Image (cartoon, rainbow, N blue to C red):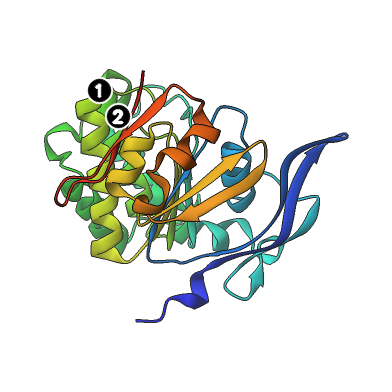
Amino acid sequence: MDHSGSDFVLDGAGFSVGDRTILARLNLRLAADRLHALVGPNGSGKSTFLKLIARQLTPDSGTIRLGDRDLATFGSRAFARQVAFMPQFTPATDGMTVRELVALGRFAWHGALGRSSPKDRAAVAEAIERCDLAAFTQRPVDELSGGERQRAWIAMMLAQESRWLLLDEPTSALDAGHQVEILDLIAALTRERGVGVVAVLHDINMAARVADEILALDRGTLVLRGGPADVMRPEVLTPLFGPRVDVLPAEGARPALAYMR
């Protein structure tokens, strides 16, 4: 199926603060049915990139389109029907239950004063079930473990039924086991629903494990774009992460593994 009408297209898009370039002008297209991982050292521009396509920031050069529409032409609710964004630090939930949080994902479809429809309730129930949260629906979100809380936020994004999921370091506060769980869930959703995902990931091994495509940023510049096999090579990772990184060769279906000496 051709999903190109929902692709992100950056045409010379960049962002600066004063005379400091945070993100150099980029020209690229992100396909809507793939999981794109953004990697790179701290300060490389990953979060800025994500915030630009999430409309949290406005480019000061070039344009960004979703399909054939400039992002600036979308109303807030119309954009939310296309794009769901989870920041690195999610807002406080103030005693909200899991079901109440997930139901917020329907705001884009019925508005603050709209009544919940059968379709809304079905979308919430499906998202809760898909994220394995049925046992937690009445639990306050702030009482959940880190992995459970991340699944609740992802369920809210699913209930939103957007075309894109944008996630800023969704696994940064989790242990390795929960990182795998969350990223496997995100990868499965890409395949099952055909949604596009852009995720900032701080662990290059996790990125290689789940991503269809990896975009490597360094000092605001896109330095490499390709599949995991293209990126998981010493000559690529050493300039990004320094001479202490080594790469173990891939074995069978497993990707190569990078580690710090």
Looking at the image, residue 72 lies above or below residue 179? below
Residue 6 position, x and y percent, is: 50, 71
Q: Which residue is mark 2?
A: 149
The quadrant of the picture occupied by the C terminus is top left
Figure quadrant of residue 196: bottom left
Residue designated by label 1: 144
Local secondary structure at mark 2: helix
Q: Quadrant of the N terminus?
A: bottom left
Residue depicted at x 23% and y 36%? 180
Q: Is residue 73 above or below residue 124?
A: below
Q: CA distance from mark 1 to mark 2?
A: 6 Å
User: Is there a contact, CB below 8 Å, between mark 1 and mark 2?
Assistant: yes
Identify the residue at horizontal 24%, vertical 21% (top origin). Answer: 145
Task: Tell me if 199 is positioned left or right of 191 in this view.
Answer: right
Nearest to the observer: residue 215 or residue 250:
250
Disc 2 residue type? Arg
